Amino acid sequence: MSTPENTPENEPQEGFVDPGLADHRPRRADVEPKANKRAERQVAALFGLSVVGTVIALWAYFTKDAGDGGDVATIQSVNMWIGLGIALAMAGIGFGAIHWAKTLMRDHEMVEERHELRSSDEAREGAIQNLKDGAEDSGIGSTGTKRRSVLKGSLITAVAIAPLAVLVPQIGNMGGDWNISKFRHTLWGPGVRLARDPDGELIKASDVTMGSVFHVIPEGLNDLDHHHKMVEKAKAVVLLVRLDPADMKPVAGREDWSFDGIIAYSKICTHVGCPVALYEQQTHHLLCPCHQSTFDVADGAKVVFGPAKRPLPQLPIAVDDEGYIVAQNDFDEPIGASYWDRLKGDGSSADVEEGSH
Amino acid sequence: MGAKVNSAAAGTANYVDERTSIGGFVKFFARKLFPDHWSFMLGEIALYAFIILLLSGVFLTAFFVPSMTEVHYEGPYETMHGVAMTEAFASTLKTSFEVPGGLLIRQIHHWSALLFVAAIMTHMCRVFFTGAFRKPRELNWLIGFSLMVLALAAGFTGYSLPDDVLSGNGLRIIDGVIKGIPLIGTYISYWLFGGEYPGVDIIPRLFTAHILIVPALILALIGLHLFLVFLHKHTQYPGGGKTHKNVVGLPLFPVYTAKAGGFFFVVFAIVALVASVFTINPVWNYGPYDPSPVSAGTQPDWYILFVDGALRLMPGWLFGLPLEWEILGYTISWNILIPSLIIPGIFFAIIALYPWIEAWATGDKGERHVLDRPRNVPVRTGIGVAMIMFYVLLVIEGSNDIVASLFHLSLNDITIFLQWAIFIIPPLSFWITKRICMGLQRKDRELVLHGHESGTIVRHENGEYIEVHTPLDEQEVWLRVNYPNHKPLEIADEFNDRGVRRKGYKWDRFKQKLSRFYYEERVEPVTWEEYQEALHHHDHGPSAQGEAEAAEAQQADAQLTNEWDKQDKAGAADK
């Protein structure tokens, strides 16, 4: 049943008449028995090709030697042969079926009427009546003799808060200890020596030649278990470079944070936390390969290009009695991406103790 | 033997039907008609890619260990000997190197994931540009949109599982983005990672999302999506005999069983071929995740590029003003929020709500089952192209380092160029597309009124040269004149006779403005009067005139040929 305003006509311009379906043009296989036979043979041949593909895949699996699994090229070649077999096996079936449909099955289009999706008025009335009856039976309907508003209210309240009983313990457990002030602290602290990433070899000031760059981790990081090592490394990695002190612009309050042109910055980008690993010696620029924030190492690691806003945090360093480079302290701000309460919290006094043991 | 098979089949059918009444369903489905068009198979590709993902994914779960427990690699791949890595990474190596065919299945899985998202997006474009989202299909558009979002989620959770350097850095970016959410960002990060990044929980959690939650939702929504396709019956392209009240097509059994069924195998074949020849995600070259190293030119999977591009595009400082604010000691990172959450949020919201936006402008309450030719809705087509351009610009920016090295350009120049282009190119492409569409509509009018150019020039006796135009056949005329000619909405006055402001006027006014934006400027289809006038132009219309001219031209041509032949013969005789 269709109402006029819900199912429009094609809105033809007045006067034009729908010419109806275009004439059906028979295919060659429809009229020529030879072409028909040929199409049938082609389809059968394609299915046959599929069998060949299956044989190739099985042959490759059983006879091709992948060696001991140590040689990537050999493994890739075995996989390639299995894959080519699968591809042929599938393509044969697929193209065979499609060719069959296109050449031999019906291609004369048929017409079917659509029915409007809207239910009939009767059905709608019936549905509403059924719901009303149900509501009355339960007593929650306003048409009932008793309104039962207490019942309704208590049900809604119970259903609304019951999920808390499930969700709070679940979600409560998922965040570990929820102590977000851990972002503020790294393994660095007074006297922690700088070591090479990844082998942990300590760095002497005399090793750092002009223009060189070191990827640095704190001493002792590699002794941690894997979990803690990853967590700490994600925060503590540092890039150490040596510039000509004449090129460096001093940053107020940090005059003694570097040593003879040797200067260390956090390697974690202040944008969204990628490692800022690409150093260009000529320009003293550090580039983050993820989103191309560029920092000028000679000028307090200020942002010169890209999406980051803040300079990289600087690690204050000094040289100890044995000539090793050591940290003077932890970073004076949380490293990495900005977050809502990064400037709030316990300050950097706690991490002095934490970092020193 | 045939008789035996037949009676066995009948017996089975009877057995099943008596217990399920399946006969009714078979009667309903078997000869259901589907219109035929190549663009209708884009959604099929998505469906088949998903089936391939399920098949290959089940195989992969047999070998993958979703654990972040540390192991030292002792497998056959020598480069990695003794390297500390998580079990997730080690089992990925094992699947690749020690399970025969394992690498192939990994590659099939990864390639079909890329294809899955690509097919969904192309399918969405088809539905968008042909107006297949109009009543009664708005809800199915929303389901399809949700499937697109879930496909992105499925892709990203899967990409992160091997725990290699690339996927780890991808997770770190996600962590950075989450932390940028005001107020609760840090807590969401803790909730997701089970504490500080990266922790030991993220891989198992992503695994559950990737193999259970997301695919279950996708499967359920695909079921709903297809159910509605059956219920609505498929849309059809315009043409003679095709109306909003019928379906013209071929029956599900046997034609589409063979075509669509066969097409699944073709998609599988292509994925298998690509997977066996082109290596993707060779994690053994990247190495296990370590927060420190990263290399230049690394890319996420293509469908994430637009977010990555937006993150690259957004400057930290704009005209000397910081885009990270510190207010009352709290930090708001607009340089993260805008590109990664606000822009994609608005972009996706427009996509999701588009059917309703257009319905407000059109004021159309009827069911629409005949598709639009994109030219006939110039504003919609323009909006679609503008949104695609916006997306593509972000994708280009997402691979700007690759673009820079391929074309020897400066990375910074590309970013600066795109920072301007993102504001200029989408509106410009909207305007150009709209103009092209209207040009095509005018061309349609021209064709209907004057016929096709035949390329034959005829000289009249009075010396006038004219080109012969072949008239359109009735099918073509119908195709080019028969489209909805929407006009801007007319709305009731703001005040009634007694000067009382009526309710809902503002909303109507908004719809009217929207409607003017869509339909104020339009090319109307040829009317019957115009057509008749053209037919009777100079006493013979395009058809009569054209036929006469064509006949004349043919006659002249035959005469010429005849004369040349004579000359040739004469020439031959001379020699």
Image (cartoon, rainbow, N blue to C red):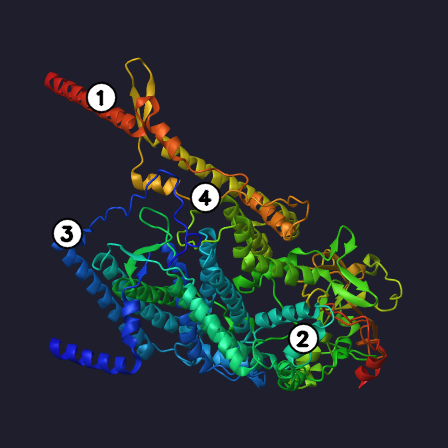
Q: Chain of mark 2?
A: B
**Residue situated in front as seen by the camera: B260 or A252:** B260
Residue A220: % across, % down = 73, 83
Other-residue count near label 1 (Cα within 10 Å), few / some / many at <14 / 14–19 / ≥20: some
**Residue at screen point 26% across, 79% down:** B17
Q: Is residue B411 above or below residue B84?
A: above
Binning the other alpha carbons within 10 Å of mark 4 as few (below 14), some (14 to 19) or many (20 upward) gives: many
Q: Earlier in the sequence, mark 2 or mark 1?
A: 2
Residue that carries the numbered disc 1 in the rendered image? B556
Q: Quadrant of residue A42?
A: bottom left
Residue B258 vs residue B335, the one in the foreground:
B258
Give the numbered dot on residue B375. Answer: 4
Cα separation, mark 2 vs mark 3, equals 69 Å
| Callout 2 amino acid | Ser
Q: Nearer the viewer, mark 2 or mark 4?
A: 4
Q: Secondary structure at mark 1?
A: helix
Q: Nearer the viewer, residue A4 or B7?
A: A4
Alpha-carbon span between mark 1 and mark 4: 40 Å
Circle 3 sits on which residue?
A31
Q: Chain of mark 1?
A: B
Residue, x 49% and y 67% (percent of image)?
B147
- Does residue B68 appear in the picture of this structure? yes
Q: Looking at the image, tell me whether mark 2 or mark 4 is earlier in sequence order.
A: 2
Could you confirm whether marks 2 and 4 are on the same chain? yes
Please provide percent x and percent y for residue B42: 41, 59
Disc 3 marks a residue whose amino acid type is Val
Tell me how far mark 3 sits from mark 4, CA to CA: 38 Å
Please name the residue that numbered disc 2 is placed on: B189
Dot 3 falls on a residue whose secondary structure is helix
